[in-house]
Every structure is written in structure tokens, then in C-alpha cells.
Amino acid sequence: MAVKKLKDMAVGESGTIVTLHGSGNVKHRLIDMGLVQGTKIQVVKFAPLGDPVEIKVKNFALALRVSEAGMIDVDVE
Amino acid sequence: MAENGQIHIALAGNPNCGKTTIFNNITGAKQHVGNYPGVTVEKKEGITKFNGQDLLFIDLPGTYSLTARSLDELVARNVIINDHPDVIVNVLDASNLERNLYLAAQLIELEQPLIIALNMSDVADEMGFTYNTDILSRRTGAKVVTTVGRNNIGTDALLETTVAVAAEQKAPNITIPYGDILEPKIAELQSAIEAASPIPYPHRWVAIKLLEKDADVVGKMMRLDNMEAVLEKANLIREELKDQVDLDVVFQEYRHRFAVELFNDITVTYPSDNETRSDRYDKILTHRIWGLPIFLFVMWLLFNFVNTVGAIPQGWIEDGFAALQEWVVTVIPEGQLQSLVSDGIIAGVGAVLSFLPLILLLFLGISFLEDTGYMARAAFVIDRVMRACGLHGKSFIPLLLGFGCSVPSIMGARILDNYKDRLVTILITPFMSCSARLPVYTLIAGAFFEPEIAGTVVFAFYAAGIVFGIIFAKMFRKFLFSGEAEPFVMELPPYHMPTLKATFMHMYERAILYIKKAGTFILAASILIWFITVYPMDVEYSKDYDQLHAELEQAYQIKDDAVLQQFGLTTDEQKEAVTAVVEEMKATVEEATVAAEEAEEDAPEIAVEDDSEIPELFADIKANNEQVFPAAWGIYKNSVRMDEESGVLDEEQASEKLEQSYAAQFGKAINPILEPLGFDWKIGVSLVAGLAAKEVVVSTLGTIYAVGGDTDNPAPLTEYLQNDPNFTPLIALTLMLFVLIYPPCIAALAVVKRETGSWKWVVFMFFYENAFAWIACFIFYNIGRALGY
């Protein structure tokens, strides 16, 4: 069990969101898509050019840029 | 209920939940697309009749939430709280219910009669989800209907429930719990609101929104009377709560908690297999190595589908209208009316309709990519590149299409959900050299550069356009749309097989919008351009052209007589025989020309010098008419020469007429502006006329230099340009640069108006492109001169 930034997680790793940093529209949008504390996520893949990253959350696929993934702390299983 | 007994229903739901499919199932073709007042969000309404009851459906923008932070969400919310529809139908994707319930939670809080349509229930079944809809109904206070939009299952049940709920007018009466700390404060503020004055919004909802500091609700309260105390109290409570909870996110978290708990309580069975069919497709389609090649291949297909395939029906339409013009000329006597109908109206309608195949194919392609779910993947794969240019992954598609035609490209920008992304993309799209600019480039490059480097020159202009696009995208981002960054948080929806009906509805809707909104403007502008290039009609010519034509005919009549005399053919019968043979020769040449055109070969050239040999083409005619052929050959040569000379007269006359037209007067008036770029007034006129369409630059140059020639036959113009001392290679390059940058065409400007919803951006685009074209050309021209070119 270790807390990592989402952007640093490896493909296939999963965990639970601990903290959401940042502010404003970006943060609110992330929350609206379900990325709140306690939500389970899994890193599915990085795009061919390394950015954005695709994650699985609440049983659907979500793409976010690595810069946004850097705002999310995850407790990795 | 509205006064006329019509029930108003708002359809709300997440993007990709199948809401539009349900809307189409219900309303069929009885739809109306407009804009919400003052904003660019599209408003779709449709009517239907059910059990004798009139129903008006409003398809709200698809949203994940209902905050004041996004225009779509705000519009959706305001329709509900301001217009008070009789029923809200919340369409939920049953295969993705947990996240979809988050929006449901926010709709419940609006305290209006609510129906939940559990859509895509077949997909959910297949995945292994089963739900207890009784619990769902009890916990949300909404009636629940199960639907499969793609197969039109459950539509009648939904309509039946809608009519019943509308008659009952019962709000859900469910509250979303916000925990022990927040609840007392919400109650406190709510009673303060109730004490202050009657407000037309749900009280508890307003209390919550004030504590969330929702900009729109705060603004609404400030405009109401007696609300100062309430707003003050809200601020005080926020101050109190600040240290106990994170006010920025706590309300959203509780709504999610409600959604998650509800989801767990109603779900009877969960899928056993974690990997869906979509996951398996994605393993290939967004693969680390194969993802990019697949993306490029799909884009190549789309581009060719729209532009290459589209060019075929586009050609038919253009040919059809050309034929119509020819026919009109034979029906209406020569004069102003003929010119108006033929060159003004028919040409204008033709211009409008010729874009239609491209638009239909574009939206067929876009619809397919969006409905299958690949569109989001395409954005996912290419976003890294587009972001480096200050754009969104999805911008790639409209920009790529821009190399074909700016009109479908600008319309295609609507795949971008975010308004700023869409606008930046629209503004830079014209830098992608459209296919109508290619003839201008090839003509000029072909005239001034060796064939080996002409291609490179043309390519350099394409590349320059891309570079300008990137620079301007970055500048617009920085200066026009600074503000807060827009997140790229994008759902990758499961892959679906699109339905024919949805695809065709989409195509139909866009085509109608284009014709109605952009078409009228394009037509009006085409007629205006026709007017300024044709009027004034009563010009004073330097020569009497009618007289010259008459003299020409007379002179050749004498020559013909001499030929007949020479061969001793004097009787009327002999003369008639000669005339018949000449006609036969002309017909043969005509036939050969048409055949060559169809085979895409060069037309046969027949030399008509005095000592020219009799061409192979006439061998048969000669053999059949040994006796009169020598005379006929002479007369044939005469007639060809006369046509040529008469053509030269016509061209001179057309040139003189154009020179005195309003367009030319305008071109001359702006000459002082264009002179520093090395352009004379003739280029100025061509550029003005080129606003109609870029290929017109070439044909106008042809007319004004009185050499004829257009995009189909540029040879005479090329030769003329090469020999014109005022037209140096440097000026040629500067002209190409100007054509690259200045506004693409009226049709493109018309769709910018349609897509941005305001003239402001049309005017902005027009001026910035002209200004930048001038500045860039000025710098380029002067550097060129300083270097001695």
C-alpha cells in the first residue's frame, strides 16, 4: 500500500483515490466525473504518445491528460 | 401545463446515454433546431401526439452535472428552473448507471415531476447487470421506465408514463442527505429564504446552491428583492463551515455518495466478467503501436470519403447548374434579366447546393465515428500533438477536413464540446489550404517556376498555412480565451453499432440547417458579387465592338467568296454542297473534342495556317467529297480564324466592361492599400471577386487580361503572366501568400455565422485574416525586394 500520483501509476495498477488537488473548473470537472475520495480506479493504458491516460472508474473508461492525473493521489493496492 | 394543453417535457441525461435516439424515436422528423437566446448552445425541440395529447419535447444538452461552470449545464438547468417543463425525463445509461445517477441526484433536487428512463437496458443485461426498479423508483421519487432506444423498445410506455406524470404533477419529494454538519445549516438558510420573499425556485435547492457559491444562483438572488439578508447569511454560514468541511467539494461528494449507495441498493446482479467487448476492441484501436497508424488510416478514409467521393456528386450538381445556365440563355432574351437569372441566381443556388454533398458525407462520417465511439478514441490518440498547438484532440478532424473545403470543416468543429476549443478551431481552419486554392497556386507557380520546383513551391504554401494555424491557435488561446484552463476529461464510451436511422437523422438535420441558415446568405452574397462585377451595364467602350464584329464578318465573307471563285464553284448548288461539307467538318471536330474530354485527353488541335496540311480527322470527309473538299477546307480555315479574331474582340470587350464595373472601381479604390504589396488594380479586382470562391481569382485574372482562360484551361493566362513585365516572380509569390491567408470564401463566412451564432466572429475573422494577409505580404514583398528579386 503506497500513495502515488495517478500519473505515476503503472498500467494495470489499481487503487483508491485519497486526495484531489488543484482547484477551479478542472477539479470540479474531475469530481463530476466521479473522481472523489474513496473511489476505486484502475489505470488501463497510456495513449500511444504517452499522454493522455485512460483509467477505469465506476465501470466506465475515462481519459484525462497526464497534467490532470498529476492532481490525483491514489492509494495503490 | 401550457395554455393550449400541450405538455412540455425536458429530456435530460449524460452524453452518450442514448437521449437523442429516444428523442428521435419520439418526435421523428418533427424537429426544430435553433439556438437558446444569446448563447451558442443548440436547442432542439420536437412534437408528437400520444393518446390525443400534444407533447412538446425539449432535448437538453447532454451533461454530466448541472453546475454553473459550463454553458451546456447552465442552459440545461435554466430550462428546467425557468421554463418549468411539466415533466423531466432523465435518460440513464443502464450499463453505466453508477455515474449516471449523479445527474439524477441533481435533477431530484430541482423538485419537479421526474421520470427515469433506464435506457440501453439490453446492453446492461448482456453485461450481467440486473436492477430492482421498484427500489429505484421509491428512492428517487420518480416513475421508472425501461427502454432500448436503438430498437425503439419502451417508447410507448415512456409516453404513457409521461402523460400520467404530467397530469399528476407530483414532484419527487426526496432529499439528498448532506450529513450532520451541513444539514442544520441548509435548513437554517432555507427558512431564511422562505421568510424573505417568495421566490420562483425550489427553496432547499437555492439554499444548497448559495452555500456552494454557485455564481448563477447568487446572481439570480441579487436581482430579487429582499435577498440581501439571505446572501449575507449564506456568506456567514460559509465562513462558519470553512474550517469543518471543504466547501469547494463537499456537496458534490455527498451527491456522489447518494448515487453510489443508491446504485448498490438497486443492483441485484453485477457482471462476472470484468473485460467487456469494448475493452477488447480498445486493445487494438488505441494500441501503443497500432493506435496511431489506425488513426491515420481512419482519417485518410474520412478525408477521401468527404472530398474525393463528395467531388463526384458535387461535379454533377455543378454540371447540372451549368447546363441549366446554358438552357436559360436560350430561353430568356439577352440582357439584364438573362444575366441576373443565369449568372446571378442560378450560379448562386448552384454555389449553395454544390457544398451539400460534402456536408452530407461529412456528417455521415462524423455520425458514424461518434456513434460507434471511435471519435473519442481518435481524440485520445492524437491529443498530445494537438495540445502542443493549444488545441484539443478532436480539433484534428475539422482541421484535416479544411484541406478539402472550409465549409464542412467549420461545420465539423461542432464535435468539440467546449465552446472555446470550437471557436479557436473554426478561426484557424481557413489556414488549411482548401482545394479551391490549389488552382490558384498551381497556375501561378506553374507560370513562374520550373516544373521541378513548382511542386515544392505549392507544398511550401500548404506547410506555411499549417504553421500560421499553429501560431494563431496559440495566440488566440493566449489573448482571446485566456481565462481558466479547460479540462480534457473525456469519457471513452463503449463501442456501439450505429443505427441507420440516427445517422440519417443527423445528416438530414445538418443539411437542412446549412441550406436554411447559410444557404440564403451565400445566395445573397453570390448575387451581390455578380452585381458588382457585371454592373454598370451601360459602359462606354473605347471601340465600337458591334461595328468591328460586322466588319470582321464582311471581310471573311469576301475571303470565302474568293475561295469559291478560285475553285470555280459558282452555282448555288455547289455553294450549298461546300457549306454542308464545312458543317460536317465542324461537327467532326466537335465530336472529337467531346470524346477527348471524356477520355480526359487533350482536345485535337487543327492547324489552320495557309500551308497547313489536311488533318487525319478529315480524311474520310475528303475521300467522300473529292470535288468540293479543297474549297471547303479553305472556308473551314477561314471560319476558324474568324472565330478566333472575333473571340479576341469579345475578350477585349469583356475586359473593358469589367474594368468599368463596380468591382473594378472598388479594386482601383483600394489600390493604394494593395500597392505596397506590389499588386496593381487588376490583382485587386481578382482578389475582391475571389471572395466568392478562390478559383474565381484565376478566371477573373483571365477576363481582365482579356486572354480568356480559366481553371480548366489555364494555358493562355500562364503565357500572359509570364510575359507581363509587371508580374514578377516575387509578386506572384506574394499573391499566393495573400490567397493563402485572406478569407476563404463567402460560404465559409456564412457557416462561421451559423456555427458561432453571431456576426461578431464573422467580422472578426474577416478583418483579422485580411489584416494578417496584408502584413505578411508586405513583409514578404519588401524582404524579397531588399534581396534583389
Image: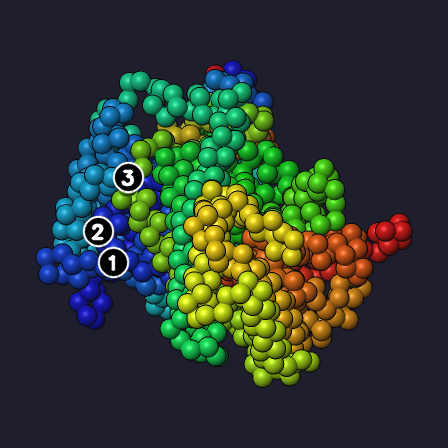
Mark 3 and mark 1 lie on one chain; the one further toward the N terminus is 1
Q: Is residue B443 left or right of residue B756?
A: right
User: Could you tell me the amino acid type at mark 1?
Assistant: Lys
Residue A70 seen: yes
**Residue B575 percent location from the top left of the image:** 46, 67
Crowd class of label 2 (few under 14; some 14 to 19; many from 20; radius 10 Å): many
The subunit letter for the residue under badge 3 reads B
User: Could you tell me the amino acid type at mark 3?
Assistant: Thr
Q: Is the residue at mark 2 from the same chain as the one at mark 3? A: yes
Closest to the camera, between mark 2 and mark 1, is: 1
Element assignment for label 3? loop
Element assignment for label 1? loop
What residue is disc 1 on? Answer: B30
For the point 21% across and 39% down, the residue is: B151
What residue is disc 3 on? Answer: B499
What residue is disc 2 on? Answer: B26
